[in-house]
Amino acid sequence: MTDVSLNPALVAAKEAQEKVDACLDAGHSFRLEAGAGAGKTYSLVAALKRLVAEKGAKFLQAGQKVACITFTEVARDEIRQEIEEHPAILVDTIHAFSWAFLAKFQKALRGLVAELDDRQEKIEEGGGIGEKPVEYSFGFFGVEENKITLGHDDIPSFMAKLLSQKKFRMLLTQQFPVIFIDEYQDTDKNFMMAILEHFLQTGEGPLIGLFGDHWQTIYRGEYDLVEFPVEGIDKGANFRSAPAIVSVLNKLRPELEQAVSDPDAEGEARFFHTNSYQGERTNSTHSKNDLLPDLSHTVRAALLERLESEGWNINKTKVLMLTHNALAAEQGYPSIAEIYNRNEAFAKKEDPTIKFFAETLEPMSAAYSDGRYGEMFRLFGSAPAIRAHANKLAWRGSMDALNDLRTNGTIGDVLDHLKQTRRPQLPDRVVRREEELDSLTVQPIPEESTSLLRHSKLREVKYAEVIQLVKFVEGYTPFATQHSVKGAEFENVLVILGGGWNHYNWSQLLELLETKALNGKNTKGYYRARNLFYVSISRPMKRLAVLATQTMPDAALKTAAHLFGADNVEGIAVE
């Protein structure tokens, strides 16, 4: 039997889980704050399994379920698999969960639509509300002759508004006596404020379990911890990183000190800067005091070569860049990066078109080019009826034409080709977007139809950018961004701190960590940068290196010395 006491992280995790169990037993709401590498999802799944074991049959008999609301579809699928899709647990994204609840209350939905002051002109143009059914499918608002469609942002907003009415709160509680919210810090603000105001502050309603980490908020604009009137449980464990890396995290965040899994594990955490360089540096609106792009690339490559000579396995190393715009230019998909206001839409394949390209079309084209026809047809979804030579010629003609369009055409050209050949067939969500665009004919796309606007712009981009993007998102390159790796882990990580992103001022962050001179002007930017820095440096399991290509003031270097240790801060020569 393993001696638990030899694993400090396991001891800390066990203590946190016991507190969660105690809250479940007492019927008290709680917030589990799980820092990077702590195993948040493990704790959430353990709590769900405990509820299933102790109350699953009772919930099913009463026609009730435990709701687990996730931030992404990826998290939803992972949790569903872990609990073996038990019928007493409903795991879904906030939009799917909310719409399943809202859809039944058509009269109330029509009332909420009528209250949308900024949509009155569109409502009148569509013939009014009347008794039209309210639907949610395409993700943008519209009023037609026989229906009303809601926008993506309308769903959590409408859910929050219904929860302000006692009747709907009672119905929700009756159906879901326990609600877990995964990544609470990134969940829609309106929804979370409704949960806070109508359930947590009143002590009424379902038992609420919040799972997340406010230091890993990188998708919303609020970075402080909301004062939830529930028991706060800190999970002070780190099962991911070597002690040298966890030491940096603990110095950066002393209020949530983490215990390591193996106190004797080898590892390193180092900080490199380029202050010695006296040549020309950047001086634009979006980039200050950074090495010029070509020199920055050279310095980065030289450092990677050096780290490899010192024992780093470069094949197991991720280079975390500051921004998709800089990275996209280097990797070859700048136009795609400019279209999306959230990197996750393409970096994590949340956009259905990008997901289809990455998971079906590109692998299928590669299989065809390599002569792996069995794999090609597996990705196609079934073995087509090829009984005659003419069938083979037709398939070959379709695939050859597709490959030509992939190389020389636009994304729109590829989509149009696939709509005709159905080799492979487009997913329903992509087909619907195409149909919506076609239905508008000469009419402009409504401004609130953000997903359709993005899709329209995407059609104009050269498909060659998709090929490069897929190489990136599928991990065929060593580069990534901090946004794209939230929740991920790698053996080694090199983080690049440069002056090329106006939203994040890294020299100022490190300086403010030392001086604590926060004010109304710099506070929001400080927290935004701090959180992204935390997410970045907490990814590696064994080795961490940070390279500052932007000039670092003395106070910033003092912070680096505090975090990494003076012996691990090094100025490198730049020629």
Image (cartoon, rainbow, N blue to C red):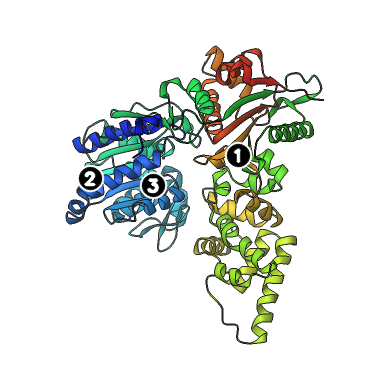
Q: Secondary structure at mark 3?
A: helix
**Residue farthest to the bottom, as pictured:** 388
Rendering quarter of residue 315:
top right
In the rendering, at what x and y percent does residue 70 appear?
A: 39, 46
Separation (CA) of disc 2 from disc 3: 17 Å
Residue 87 visible in the shown view: yes
Query: Which of the two residues, 563 or 4, is positioned nearer the viewer here?
Result: 4
Q: Secondary structure at mark 1?
A: strand
Crowding around mark 1 (Cα neighbors within 10 Å: few <14, some 14 to 19, many 20+) is many
Question: How many numbered marks are there?
Answer: 3
Q: Which residue is mark 3?
A: 94
Closer to the chain start, of discs 1 and 3, is: 3
Separation (CA) of disc 2 from disc 1: 39 Å
Residue at image point 55% right, 51% down = 349
The image's mark for residue 177 is 2
In the rendering, at what x and y percent does residue 127 appear?
A: 42, 58
Left or right relative to 288: residue 213: left
Residue 425 visible in the shown view: no
435 versus 508 height, above or below: below
The image's mark for residue 481 is 1
Query: Which of the two residues, 491 or 224, is positioned nearer the viewer here?
Result: 491
Q: Are marks 2 and 1 in contact (CB under 8 Å)?
A: no
Residue at image point 57% right, 37% down = 482
1 versus 262 height, above or below: below
Q: What's under tag 3, amino acid-wise?
A: Ile
Crowding around mark 2 (Cα neighbors within 10 Å: few <14, some 14 to 19, many 20+) is some
Q: Secondary structure at mark 2?
A: loop
Q: What's under tag 2, amino acid-wise?
A: Pro
